[in-house]
Amino acid sequence: MKKNYGMVIDLDRCVNCQTCMVACQMEHGTPPRVFFTRVLQSEGGKFPRIQMRFFPILCNHCQNAPCEDICPAEAVYTNEDGVVLIDSDKCTGCGACREACPYNIPVLLERGKLKESYWGDELIPFEREKYKELKEGTVVKCDFCIDRMEKGMDPACVEACPTDTRVFGNFNDPESEVSHLLSSRGGRQPHPEFNTNPSVYYVG
Amino acid sequence: MYEKVKSVCYGCQCSDAGIIATKKDGELIAIRGDPNCPPSYGRICGKGLSSLMVPYNPQRIMKPLKRMNSKKGLDQEPEFEEISWNEALDIVADKLRWIREEYDPRAHILSCFDYPPVWFGPVWLTASGGQFFFGGSVWCGWYHNVYFNFYQSFYREIDYEHINHLILWGSQSGHLVDALPVPTAREQADARHRGMTLKVIDPVATNVVKSADEWIPIRPGTDGALALGMLNLLLNEFEIYDREFIKHYTNGSYLIASDGRYQRDAETDKPLIWDENKKEAVPFDKAEAPSLEGSYIVNEEKCEPAFKRLKEHVKQWNVERVSKITTIPPETIKRLAREFGEAAKIGSTIDIKGKQFPLRPAAIQQGKGPGPHRHAMHTVYAIEMLNVIMGNLNVPGGQLGISPYYKRRWRPSVSKDGLMLSANDYWKFGCQDPLLDRQKAKKPTMYNCRDLCPIASYADMLVPIIMRNKELFGMTYDIKMTIISHTNIVHSYGNPDQMIKIFDDMNDLIVGFSTEMNETMEYLCDIVIPIAHWTERYDPLAQGAPFKFQTVGDRDWHWLFRRPIKDPPENHKHPADLLLELARRAGFERDVYKTFNEWWQIDEEYQLDPDGQYSYLEMGDALLKDRHGVSVDWFEKRRTNFFTQEKTPEEAYPWCGIFGGRVPIYLEWWLDVGKEVEKVVKEMGIDDIWEVDDYTPLLDWKGCSSHRERKDDELWLVNPRVPTHHQASDINNPWLHEAGEQLPKTFGVLINPETAKDRGIEKGDLVTLESPAGIKEKGIAIITEGIHPDVVGVFGSFGKYAKGEKIAKGSGLHWNKFISFTDIDRLDKVSAGYDSCVLVRVFKSK
């Protein structure tokens, strides 16, 4: 059967320590102000009965991916695991996918961006090494750590999360932890009204 | 060429996460959690991962520097010039030799908050004759005392495996802001998932409030009143307390005479207990049925159990009075107390690996918030007393000490009065056991003296205060040299102008060991010597012995081993090796080795030869062999970063029923201490500034000056933490700085909407905070319902000035600058803690 890899995020467990964000930077070597994942924070209610919310976001790897449909260069594709990827050799950086994505996820890696060092100086060895995997003038986003998946590893954000907020697996395997989580605790896709069928679900 | 190295994270002082680092051609290109290293469950946090950036800071200090501008101050350029390693080390060693041989060996200070070599620093200092200055203790030292007494440990953590009801009191446990950040994050998330109730008492809604069932905002510095009110409710109104525990495992059953002292057995001098079976007073170790109530005539004197005294004493803390002080509604206080008491399931037991233990699945964990106030010791004891009366100390579901009871020299013992004595060697580390080996009060001879604070765990706060008031305290010598390693006392202590002036006025030479620039290096140090970053150094006992931040509960012991991931720049050494080199050049290397052998009672076969020459790693090797039967070679051959040993259930839950000994609910010996201190301060002629009225066996809340003097338009300025920045130096890490920017509140000024409205302040306005002393900071207003209306908050430690911290400079506000050391009245004379209440007016900047 076709696989559908995705993530279940348990909002009850997230403490907004931002480890996921930093682990993602470590894995992908994203330059300053480029994020493949972040944690949104909001607050509601009245003193002292307030509700705080931490909301990790990343590419939803939609099964009906508008970014894939719109891409004029056919650079965006869904692989056999259900992961939505961008072929940087084909991507022209036109930005159509960015306009099409209702979640505002893809980021254009502007020209000159890979000369930017976090220290604001020369690139450090880590940046020199990791920037090789990126291509200026193309659109980038979370790829569920496809290189790690090939080695049977979880995405970097999942592996590092100190609270086990993020769980990764194949929704089409009824025995996977993500399937168990959805059947035991429900699970909500972000903005189902967009009709994109995300592979990221939230519980809690 | 790629290479993988297993090591241990030191992104903060906790060292609780095993890591696997990847190198390419000798340079660090990845860090991840080591999935097989047990303490952190293979996880790591953002601070640990971001450490990858630090060794590559282009502003990293590469060569020893000498300050050419003799004037010091925030407005002065240091005018550093590079000097040779030899010259730098000789300047320091010559001064050290002169101090030791010609002036006074006590006249130098080592200020150090580097945890892994915590077994080494004090050995070096004992050999050199100098004094220790933690440099961070002003904000955390005061409360260790209570843990020594109640948990036989340096620190404590919650048994998340069994707890059902947790009150975090000025603490962010489980949210990456605490002593064991990574393991507790997962353990608490599991407990919450299991249904654990979480309540949070804090003036500010930090991240932990997101996970809480209820947030109880409190007015800063009034925590002691709330604790006493809850004690009153539990003891007198709801009558929920662990009667059997109090009878047998506290001194609550000891008879107290009219002078407040124990009624003692004439023959054995042991404190007496009224035995309800025998209907007579018997020595504490002979009582079968101790009484907690009633009055008795013993030795022709009326006396009553200490517990009864406590019960009567807390009646004055009625809920209406407490509500007025704390601003918490009476019904909330009642609910808080009742739910806590009921959740403790007093009387329940649990089997662990075939052994029966009391089960008390409710606990209170206090963090840094409540303590640093004028009567710190009373407050921290009052809060902890709530745990004591539930009998939840070191039992499943309760709060557990994190220092190991392990092998020889670690077991607790019992005092002659039947109280449990600390199991640990704290007092060797400038900390001291509040009961055992209690120093007598005496006229101070050291700047970090506990002579005037004989039951404080440590008293470093006094260093700048005594330096400033040398004559008043009768000091006969100056501090001529200060070596500062792994601390930033100019920024993280109090007002930087004051700190610079106090240290500069007295010292001939101030030396900094650091990888990066910071305020202390730039504005205070005469000589700066670069050191290896943690990714470039060995730490054979990575968690720091003997305190050892061990994970608690029914998990094996683990001991972590840090090895260098990459080579340091040429000549950059571990700071401990620098200290050894200084000892060599100043002529007391031999004393260091001798002290090491004696201090650690090293078995003969592993002892160092005083005439030999050793590195920090070789010394650690001797300690590993002696203590744990493993060696540096053992780790290196296996390429591992840890070893584990089975923990017995008794070691996991070492409650009083196992080791014997009682915990104090009546601090009887404080009376003696108070009298001793009083005598000394009278002799010194400082009794007008050094009051002794806090040495009482029962606890009170008296408030800080801010609670009496606050004007209507003033707000308390508090200083909470976000997870990625609970260490001052993190903010100059570009990854973490960027992470901080992604959170909505990190760098702003938190104000309650009502408070803002009253002042005409709107979201995004530039606002000024101004203290009555005229200290000012400016920042952007963040309007949030998550803060008490009497309070304004800035996260920390931000507001950096150092030019060498290019990333951090200009972000956030500097809370510490509002803390002045001129006011001895702000000092808690028992704990040597300092009142952190800061009052400010807040207004829109022009």
Image (cartoon, rainbow, N blue to C red):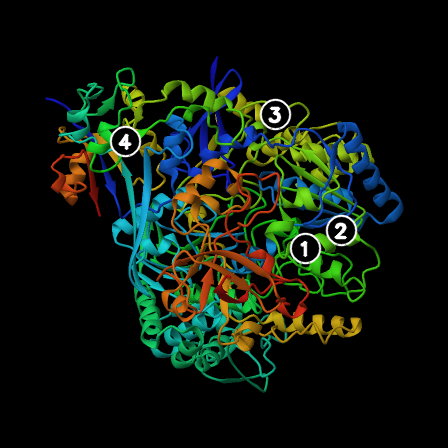
Circle 4 is placed at which residue position? Answer: A106
The foreground one among A160 and B304 is: A160
Residue at the image point whose x is 71% and y is 71% from the top: B676
Q: Is residue B278 left or right of residue A16?
A: right
Disc nearest the viewer among 3 and 2? 2
Pointers 3 and 2 in contact (C-beta within 8 Å): no
Q: Residues within 10 Å of mark 4 (few under 14, many from 20)?
A: many
Amino acid beneath label 3: Pro
Label 2 and label 4: CA atoms lie apart by 54 Å
Secondary structure type for disc 2 = helix
Circle 3 is placed at which residue position? Answer: B568
Q: Which of pointers 1 and 3 lies earlier in the amino acid sequence?
A: 1
Residue at the image point whose x is 38% and y is 41% from the top: A18
Secondary structure type for disc 3 = loop
Disc nearest the viewer among 4 and 1? 4
**Above or below for B558 versus B373:** above
Which of the numbered marks, if any, corresponds to residue B504? 2
Amino acid beneath label 4: Pro
Specify the subunit that label 4 lies on: A
Residue at the image point whose x is 70% and y is 61% from the top: B465
Tag 1 and tag 2 share a subunit? yes
Label 3 and label 2: CA atoms lie apart by 31 Å
Tag 1 and tag 3 share a subunit? yes
Label 4 and label 1: CA atoms lie apart by 48 Å
Tag 3 and tag 2 share a subunit? yes
* Residue B549, x across and y down, in percent: 50, 44
Q: Residues within 10 Å of mark 2 (few under 14, many from 20)?
A: many
The foreground one among B339 and B462 is: B462
Label 1 and label 3: CA atoms lie apart by 34 Å
Amino acid beneath label 2: Asp
Specify the subunit that label 2 lies on: B
* Residue B446, x across and y down, in percent: 76, 56
